[in-house]
Structures are given as C-alpha cells and as structure tokens.
Amino acid sequence: MSIFEGYLSTSEAVAAFSGPGVVAAMLRFEAALAQAQADEGLMPQAIARSIVGTCRVELFDVEKIVRDSGRAGSVAIPLIKALREAVGLFNAEAVEWTHFGSTSQDVIDTALVLVTRDALALVDADLQRCTETLLALAERHADTPMLARTLMQPASVTSLGFKCADWAAPLVRGGQRLQQAAAQALQLQLGGGVGTLAQMQVDAQRAAAVRARVAAALGLRDGGGAWHTQRDDWVALGCALGLLAGSLGKLAADLALLGQHEVGELMEPAETGRGISTVMPHKRNPVASMVALAAAQRVPQRVAALLAGMVQQHERALGAWQAEQAEWSSLWMAAHGGLRALATALPGLRVDTARMQANIDSVCAELPGETVRAWFAPAQVAMAGVQARQRVAELRRAAG
C-alpha cells in the first residue's frame, strides 16, 4: 500500500488485509484442517495438537514470508515451509502431516474469505451509521424546503427530507445486496490439488466430512466442493461492494455541490485541522466527500479486474487468480475508506435552512408568477414531506 492510499482507507481495513492479518488467517485454516483430519481419524490427535499449537502468527517472520512469496509465486509456499520447520522443532513426526491433502489456493482463498468477513463487519457497521443518520435527517427535515436541481440547474422545490430519504434508499438496498452475496461467497475453499480432495487418500465421504468440520471450525459455509476457478459467488460479492461505493459517491457528489460557497445549503462539519487549505485559511474543503468520491473513482477498475479475472484456465488459474487477490484487497480498503469518511461526517452535517429558502426566493424572483405558483407552491413541499415520511418508514422496515 502506498502513502497515497493510506488516507483513503481506514486503519482497520488496512490491518485486515495486511501481511500479519492474512498470515494469521492462513494459520487458522491450517490449524482447523489438522484438527478436522485428526477428528476423522486421518492423523493421530497428538500430531494435530503439535500443528495446531504452532499455528500462531507471532511465531513467524511475516515480512520474510511476504518477501519470499515473490520468488515462490505464492505467499502460501514460504508460509507452509516456515510452518513445517516450526512444527518440526516440536514434533518431527508431525511435519509430513502439516498442510496434508490441501493446496496453496485452499489456504489463500480461505484466508481471504476470513479477512473479508472481518472487513464486511466494518462495512456493515459504518453503513448502518450512514443510513441511520440520513433517515434521522429525513424525518427532521421532511418539510424543510429546498431547491431540486436537474441538469445542474435549479428545477423546482422539494424538501431536504425527501432528498435525504433518496440518499438513504440505495444504502439500504446496498446493505441487503452485500449480505445476500456474502451468504454465498463466504465459504470454505478446500479441494486439494485439482479440487477432488484425492490427496487426503480417503474415500469421498470421509473427505467431505473433513471439509464439513473445517468449515464449521472457521464459521464458514461448506459449499460442497472447491471453487478454485469458478469465481462467480466471490466476484458477485465484489460487484455488490462496487455498487455500494457508487451510491456513496453519488451522495458525496451532492454534498460537495451543496456545500459550495455559492450554494451554501449543506456543509461538512468544521473541525480543527480538517479540510483546511495550505494557502487560503478561509477555505473549508469537503474532505469526507473527497474520500468517498476518490473511492467511487477507483472501485470500478477493481471490480472490472475481478470480472476480467473470471476467465480462468481449467482447474487452477495462471495469472487471473493472482491478479484477483491484489485487486480484492484494494477494493475493500478503498470502499471502506469512503464509507467511513461519510459515516463520520454525516452526523455533524451543517444544515442552513435560511440559505435554502434564500436560494429558492432568488430563483422565484426571476420567474413569472404562474411559473412560481406551478412549481414552487407550498403544496409541492408538503407533497415531498409526505413522501419523505413514507419512504423513511419503508426503509426502516427494509433495514430491519
């Protein structure tokens, strides 16, 4: 991660996809695999205990593993090498059982599933904060008149509450879409060299039992087989996140436009050291909107790369899967950065109702009376207020 990505993400998302975060998740997989195999009688319990006891990230030089992965072509290869060496220090007999019946993609994919589940929890929490703030604003300002704008020009009158409910709607849908996609995508990867689990040297029923035990130990869905080169469920989750980032970008764009000095209707909260200019002290830049817009600019390329990477050869991919791994972490870090920025800023949003009315009055002063009566009458605001309240009630029900 470059210095320029750091301020566009969050420390929690960065930690989840960091070297220690991913290696720790890989070790969780190896420990669960060994214990499941012992419970199914594939190896002695004492062997499994030696492996499980060694699967602690603090025992490993993560930076060296990451460095060595470039030459090996996979982060799993230097990790398994280091794990076997560490296991051998305590129990030489356990070395040959370490990573038994599995393959590099099993441990890497499952580790990414585990850290993605953590990242999804971060996204879900901040998404709920954003949504609840917008719904509260929609209720509070259901009858607050403001200009609606089409093609970047003043159009008619609406209400701030209606606009906030409109912003909240795709966030509610986005959260539902993410959870539905995650229910399919967050599944164990375990198939061995070519997806058949033949390297476990047991019949299909016992191999399936091992897979079920590993999935249960890690709290993941057992999809009933490997998905080494069938990435549809996984990519669908990435696409759902991409849609959410786009919805957040639309919200951020509106906030930035409404906060322009010439408009001045909604402003991000002013805080010491936040949004200041290096040369113009009177400026207050909309930093949260900026971060969310940056995410909306970057995320589509990440999603496109995931879709392009679905073209994978035969049972294991050359290049496409490896590209997907890099894009996946960047996607989640960028999307959560934009989401956290808005979740932090929205509760302190400054609403200038006087400026909203002044902007309406300025437009009306230039229009014929019949046009004002048709498009700016109080009944227009009342209608928007009724619909805002109805939408809030519907969205709260949908959000559960």
Image (cartoon, grey):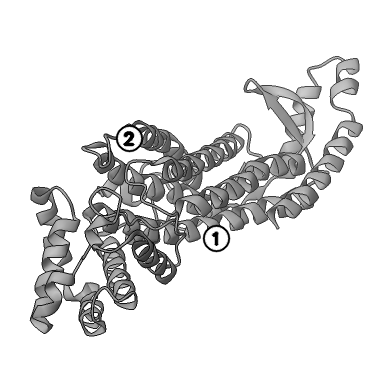
In the image: residue 353, left or right of residue 177: right
163 in relation to 172, above or below: above
**Given the image, on which type of amino acid does mark 1 rest?**
Ala
Residue 124 at what x, y percent from top left? 54, 57
Residue at 35 percent across and 31 percent down: it is 308
Q: SS for tag 1?
A: helix
Q: Nearer the viewer, residue 53 or 296?
A: 53
Q: Which numbered tag is attached to residue 27? A: none
369 in relation to 57, above or below: above
Looking at the image, is mark 1 or mark 2 nearer the viewer? 2
- Please tell me how crowded label 1 is: few (under 14), some (14-19), or many (20+) other residues with Cα within 10 Å: few
Residue that numbered label 2 is attached to: 309
Q: Nearer the viewer, residue 208 or 55?
A: 208
- Circles 1 and 2 in contact, beta carbons < 8 Å: no
Residue at 21 percent across and 77 percent down: it is 51
322 in relation to 17, above or below: above
Residue 335 at what x, y percent from top left? 44, 46
In the image: residue 102, left or right of residue 180: left
**Given the image, on which type of amino acid does mark 2 rest?**
Gly
Q: Is residue 269 visible?
A: no
Q: Which numbered tag is attached to residue 125? A: 1
Residue 189 at what x, y percent from top left? 35, 55
Q: Is residue 303 visible?
A: yes
Q: CA distance from mark 1 to mark 2?
A: 29 Å
Q: SS for tag 2?
A: loop
Q: Nearer the viewer, residue 115 or 335?
A: 115
233 in relation to 13, above or below: above
- Please tell me how crowded label 2 is: few (under 14), some (14-19), or many (20+) other residues with Cα within 10 Å: many
On the rendered image, what quadrant is the C terminus found in?
Answer: bottom right
Q: Residue furthest front?
A: 203
